[in-house]
Amino acid sequence: MKFSYAVYKDEETEIQMHVDELLRHPDYLKIKMNLYCPGEECDAKLSIIRLSNGTDYFRRHRGYYHSETCGYLELDQVPVKSITEYVTENGRMTDDGINRQKQDAMRTLDNYLNPQIPIREEIKPKNKPRKVREPGEETEINVGTKVVYDPNAEIIEKDTKNGDRKILETRFYSRMPHQISMKDSNKNLKTSAVLDQIIFSESNLYVEIKANFENISLKFILPEAFFNNSRTRLMPDELLNYLKIINEYIQKENKEIFITTMCQSQEIDLEDLALWIFEPEFMSFQTRNGHKFATLTSLVIAIQTKSI
Ligand SMILES: [Zn+2]
């Protein structure tokens, strides 16, 4: 079951924490390791679950169980009616999938910069009767395709060779830079940071974007694949030129522009945080006061027309 509150416990304190409070907390990485079920005298640990659609909640950690005194004990045992087994396949995201991910990531940054105070809702368990599976009722098993992001593969969409098979697009985990830990190594992530400088190499199609967020410095690496992967058919030279226009703007105008982007991590080095961007369409940009630019092109147009 989903919890919106958990109890944080250490030697000195025991406080209730809403999932949104945790996400904003500077000690996020420490606190999320010590969260417990809000039920009476319950020592079941809770983990944070972050769905790619922007829903965040707590769930009982697999290795822990509610205590006998806990009001959530019964509620947390719902039988499963159907499950989907996924076969993995390498592929790229659909355009719709990318747009959904980016819109969600831009909302996450907006909420971070302009937090809403969570409402203290009643957290007592409701007296709902436990759902019991009918005798003889079987668990239905469906088969689907789970897409593993591969910048060099084809886009996998429904209605091509896959028929009505359920397609599960690659999941990009939402992580602000201060929430990134070693556990995020080799993952698909979506994150935001303030642009500092874009560094170009002399001859190669290779660019580094230096950025920062809440005292954390990081860099985004645009490898050669980035320049050859444009869905809107921007040529490598055009992409380089766009990036130069943006760099010139941030250096001259000294304005705060956030990049919000889908990206990939390799082995995480917290002293030298680097993330790879494989497609220009993975990028979006926004400002603290809510201006949103869903694509690289739209930011460049805004700069050139002096509308920001
Ligand atoms: Zn419990």
Image: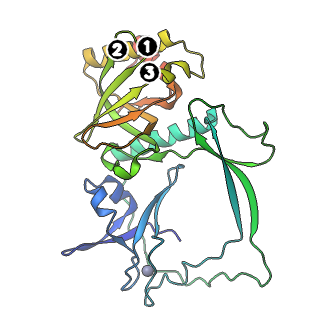
Q: Position of residue 19 (x, y in %)?
A: 39, 61
Element under label 1?
A: helix
Residue visible at 43% across and 13% down?
240
Type of the residue with mark 3: Leu
Q: Earlier in the sequence, mark 2 or mark 1?
A: 2
Query: In the rendered image of this protein, does residue 247 appear above or below residue 264?
Result: above
Residue 286 lies left or right of residue 298; in this view the side is left
Element under label 2?
A: loop
Q: Nearer the viewer, mark 2 or mark 3?
A: 2
Q: Position of residue 81 (x, y in %)?
A: 71, 71
Residue placed under numbered mark 1 in the picture: 240
- Mark 2–mark 3 distance (CA, rounded to whole Å): 22 Å
Residue 177, quarter of picture? top left
Residue placed under numbered mark 2 in the picture: 201
Query: In the rendered image of this protein, does residue 253 appear above or below residue 113?
Result: above
- Mark 1–mark 3 distance (CA, rounded to whole Å): 14 Å
